[in-house]
C-alpha cells in the first residue's frame, strides 16, 4: 500500500521471481531460494486501476418511475444508466444531469430484468409476461420486433461475451417455464431452446469459454455448450433451490472491451472493433490463466458450492455458515474474494480459490438481498430489506457508511 495520498491510498502487489510477496521480504526470499547477497528484482503492479472516490452521502435522487424500480444497470462503458420498473417502462438516464434521457414504452407488464450488450450499443429488457425487447440507448427506440417465446416470466438475461463475437447479437434468457432460450437480437427470433431442467430456471450465465451455466429450482446447475445446446454436465449437491450463480470472470466479461485507464475519460472507446475484441480476449486469458473459469452457486439450503465447471462434476468446496437461504453471491473484480448475502442478515466473505471462510460482516437488521464490489475491489456495498445500503471497507472489514432509505 502506497500512502503518498493518505486519504485515498493506492494498493499495489509486489513480486519476486513471479511469486507474490504476501507477508515480508525475508519469507518471500526463502520461498524462491534467494539470499540477501544477490541482486533482487522486485516487480510491482497497481491493484486499483480505477479512481474510486469516497462515498459519504447520496448525491442526487432521480424520480420518474411510477412504480417500484426492479432493475438498474450501468452500461459497460460507464456512459449510460438504465432502469426497469413495475410501471412497465425502461428509462435511460443522463448520469451527469441525473435526468431521464428517454422513457421507453413497449412492455405490458413489470420489467423484471435488464442487460447491456458487451459493447454498450443496446439494452435488453424482459418482463413478467415472458417478452424481451431490445433498445437503442442513443435514441430510446425499440430495435426490431418484440421477442416472444417463453411461456412464463423471465428470470435472467446474459449476452454472448464480446471476445466471442463482435456483433453482440446473441442473448440468452432463462424463465420460470424451465427453458433457456438463445436469441438472435437482430433477426429477433429464437436460435436455440435448451430444455433439461425439471423446474424453473432461476439464473443463466454465459461464460467466456463457450459454455452457458444455468441454475434451477430442481436443485441442479447445468453446463451447456453454447454453440449447439448440448448438455456437458450436471452439477449436483444442493438440497434445495439454487438461487444465484456467479463466475470468476463476470467482471471482465462485462467490461472487457473497455480499457479503464485509456477509455474512462474519453468520449469514444476503441475505433477499431477488432482491436477492442483482441483486448477483451487478452483480459479474459489473463484472468483465467491460473485457475480457469470458476463458478459459485448459492442455494435455499443455506450453502454455497465452488466449482471448476469446465473439468469436473464434483465441487471444489462446500461453503457453509449461513443460517438462512443465500440470496446473492459475487466475485470481487480482482478475483480474490467471494461475498455472499443471506436472509440471516449477514454477508460472508470467502477466499475465491479455496472457498475458505474469511469473516462475517454484520450490521443489517433484516435480510440482505444483494452485494456489489467497487471496480478496485476495495469497497463493497450491500442492500437489505431494512431499507438501508451499507458500504464496507474490505481491508478493515467494517462498515464505512450507512445509507438509509432514499435521498431527500
Image (cartoon, rainbow, N blue to C red):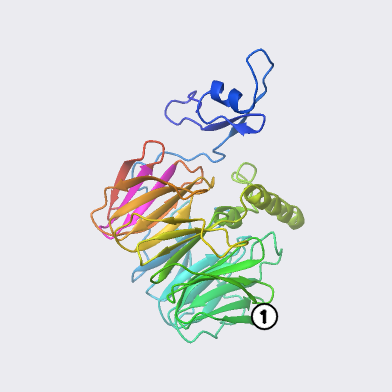
Is 346 a magenta residue? no
| For residue 196, above or below residue 337 | below
Tell me where the magenta segment starts and ends, as one range: 379-392
Q: How many marks?
A: 1
Q: Does any portion of residue 81 appear in the rendered image? A: no
Secondary structure beneath label 1: loop
- Identify the residue shown where x is 45% and y is 79%: 200
Q: Residue 374, how many percent across, how many down?
A: 47, 46
> Whole-percent x and y of residue 309?
58, 62
Farthest-out residue, top: 37
Residue 231 relative to residue 22: left or right: right
Graded by Cα atoms within 10 Å as few (under 14), some (14 to 19) or many (20 or more), the crowding at tag 1 reads few
Q: Check disc 1 and report the residue beneath it.
A: 187
Residue occupying image coordinates x 75% and y 54%: 272
- Between residues 62 and 290, which one lies in front from this camera angle? 290
Which residue lies at the image location 57% right of the left edge and 58% below the top edge? 308
Nearer-the-camera pick, 103 or 312: 312
Is residue 319 something that shows in the picture? Answer: yes
Amino acid at each position: 500500500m502506497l500512502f503518498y495520498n493518505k486519504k485515498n491510498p493506492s494498493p499495489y502487489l509486489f513480486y519476486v521471481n513471479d511469486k507474490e510477496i504476501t507477508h515480508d521480504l525475508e519469507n518471500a526470499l526463502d520461498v524462491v531460494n534467494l539470499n540477501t547477497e544477490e541482486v533482487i528484482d522486485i516487480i510491482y503492479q497497481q491493484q486499483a486501476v480505477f479512481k474510486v472516490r469516497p462515498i459519504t452521502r447520496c448525491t442526487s435522487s432521480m424520480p420518474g418511475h411510477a412504480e417500484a424500480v426492479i432493475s438498474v444497470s450501468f452500461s459497460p462503458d460507464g456512459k449510460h444508466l438504465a432502469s426497469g420498473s413495475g410501471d412497465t417502462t425502461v428509462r435511460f438516464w443522463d448520469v451527469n444531469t441525473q435526468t431521464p434521457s428517454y422513457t421507453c414504452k413497449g412492455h405490458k407488464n413489470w420489467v423484471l430484468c435488464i442487460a447491456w450488450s458487451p459493447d454498450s450499443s443496446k439494452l435488453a429488457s424482459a418482463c413478467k409476461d415472458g417478452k424481451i425487447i431490445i433498445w437503442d440507448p442513443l435514441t430510446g427506440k425499440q430495435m426490431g420486433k418484440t421477442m416472444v417465446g417463453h411461456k412464463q416470466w423471465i428470470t435472467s438475461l446474459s449476452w454472448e461475451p464480446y471476445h466471442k463475437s463482435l456483433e453482440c447479437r446473441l442473448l440468452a434468457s432463462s424463465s420460470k417455464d424451465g427453458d433457456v432460450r438463445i436469441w438472435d437480437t437482430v433477426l429477433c427470433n429464437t436460435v436455440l431452446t435448451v430444455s433439461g431442467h425439471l423446474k424453473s430456471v432461476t439464473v443463466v450465465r454465459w461464460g467466456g469459454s463457450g459454455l452457458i451455466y444455468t441454475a434451477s429450482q430442481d436443485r441442479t446447475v447445468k453446463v451447456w455448450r453454447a454453440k449447439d445446446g448440448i448438455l456437458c454436465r450436471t452439477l449436483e449437491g444442493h438440497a434445495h433451490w439454487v438461487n444465484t450463480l456467479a463466475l470468476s470472470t463476470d467482471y471482465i466479461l462485462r467490461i472487457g472491451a473497455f480499457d479503464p485507464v485509456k477509455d474512462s475519460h474519453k468520449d469514444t472507446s476503441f475505433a477499431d472493433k477488432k482491436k477492442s475484441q483482441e483486448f477483451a480476449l487478452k483480459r479474459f486469458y489473463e484472468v483465467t490463466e491460473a485457475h480457469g473459469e470458476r463458478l459459485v452457486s448459492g442455494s435455499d439450503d443455506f450453502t454455497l458450492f465452488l466449482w471448476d465447471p469446465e473439468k469436473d462434476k464434483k465441487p471444489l468446496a462446500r461453503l457453509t455458515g449461513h443460517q438462512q437461504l443465500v440470496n446473492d453471491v459475487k466475485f470481487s473484480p480482482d478475483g480474490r474474494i467471494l461475498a455472499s448475502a443471506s436472509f440471516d442478515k449477514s454477508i460472508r466473505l470467502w477466499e475465491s480459490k479455496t472457498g475458505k471462510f474469511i469473516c462475517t460482516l454484520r450490521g443489517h437488521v433484516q435480510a440482505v438481498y444483494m452485494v456489489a464490489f467497487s471496480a478496485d475491489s476495495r469497497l463493497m456495498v450491500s442492500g437489505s430489506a431494512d431499507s438501508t445500503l451499507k458500504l464496507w471497507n474490505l481491508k478493515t472489514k467494517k462498515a464505512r457508511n450507512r445509507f438509509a432509505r432514499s435521498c431527500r
